[in-house]
Image (cartoon, helix red, strand yellow):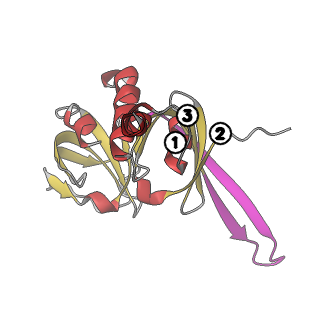
């Protein structure tokens, strides 16, 4: 009947209905995560929850800083990278989740 | 998520806090808020931050955690992914 169909849709849906479903599609895929404090992560998504807590594997973290030259006042952008094999990320630091950015 | 951490009790982890302090220790327990208790701790990174030399154990409020570095070989990624799919389904109800 109609009610049973609706319940089944909710329990076993393969369709994308809400934003978190988009993240579900990225499980076991590499993703890009923009975080607060000018940090970015690239890694393989192994787990997530409704808070956007995540577990990523094979992660590269990029931290970007800006230095101001005392004399020229020019902005010098520097980035520091590090690699972490397996990382839990707390959701309250996450700003954006996307497929990996591809340059060029 | 706290189930995942539960399976890692007894393993060594590195907790990175939002104030940039990194603490290495053995995972003693985790709760529903992802508060963490570590034993036998040491401050990783150049020890420029509080030398907590006399501190053996600590309780870390979940909300101050930025990352937890986990031992990759203690983690079953297939299991994690299946659990995440299941949890996502349950959340929708």
Q: Residue at image x 80%, y 77%?
A: A73
Looking at this view, is B81 or A8 the one in front?
A: A8
First along the sequence among labels 2 and 1: 1
Residue most toward the front? A1
Asked if the residue at tag 1 contacts the one at tag 2, i.e. Cβ–Cβ closer than 8 Å, the answer is no
Which numbered disc covers residue A25?
3
Which numbered disc covers residue A99?
2
Asked if the residue at tag 3 contacts the one at tag 1, i.e. Cβ–Cβ closer than 8 Å, the answer is yes
Q: Chain of mark 1?
A: A
Q: Are marks 2 and 1 on the same chain?
A: yes
Residue A31, located in which quarter of the rendered image?
top right
Q: Quadrant of the N terminus of chain A?
A: top left
Asked if the residue at tag 2 contacts the one at tag 3, i.e. Cβ–Cβ closer than 8 Å, the answer is no
Q: Secondary structure at mark 1?
A: helix
Q: Which residues are magenta?
A: A63-86
Residue A15, located in which quarter of the rendered image?
top right
Q: Is residue A96 visible?
A: yes
Q: Is residue A50 left or right of residue A19?
A: left
Q: Quadrant of the C terminus of chain A?
A: top right
Image x and y of residue A48, in percent: 42, 41
Looking at this view, is B44 or A9 the one in front?
A: A9
Report the magenta stretch's main SS.
strand
Using the image, determine if residue A102 lies above or below residue B51.
Answer: above
Residue A55, located in which quarter of the rendered image?
top left
Which numbered disc covers residue B42?
none
First along the sequence among labels 3 and 2: 3
Q: Is residue A46 left or right of residue A36?
A: left
- Gap between marks 3 and 2 measured at Cα: 10 Å
Image x and y of residue A6, in percent: 42, 39
Which residue is denoted by mark 1 in the rendering? A21
């Amino acid at each position: 009947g109609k009610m049973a169909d609706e319940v089944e849709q909710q329990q076993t849906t393969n369709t994308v209905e809400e934003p978190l479903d988009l993240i579900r599609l990225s499980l076991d895929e590499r993703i890009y995560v923009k975080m607060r404090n000018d940090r970015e992560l690239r890694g393989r998504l192994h787990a997530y929850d409704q808070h956007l807590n995540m577990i990523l594997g094979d992660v590269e973290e990029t931290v970007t800083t800006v230095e101001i030259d005392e004399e020229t006042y020019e902005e010098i952008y520097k980035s520091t990278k590090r690699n972490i094999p397996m990382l839990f990320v707390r959701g309250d630091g996450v700003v954006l989740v996307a497929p990996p950015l591809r340059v060029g | 998520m706290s189930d995942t951490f539960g399976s890692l009790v007894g393993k060594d982890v590195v907790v990175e806090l939002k104030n940039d302090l990194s603490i290495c220790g053995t995972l003693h327990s985790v709760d529903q808020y992802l508060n963490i208790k570590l034993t036998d701790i040491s401050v990783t990174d150049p020890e420029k931050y509080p030398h907590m030399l006399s501190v053996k154990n600590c309780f870390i409020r979940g909300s101050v955690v930025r990352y937890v570095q986990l031992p990759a070989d203690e983690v079953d990624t297939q299991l994690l992914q299946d659990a995440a799919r299941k949890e996502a389904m349950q959340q929708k109800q």
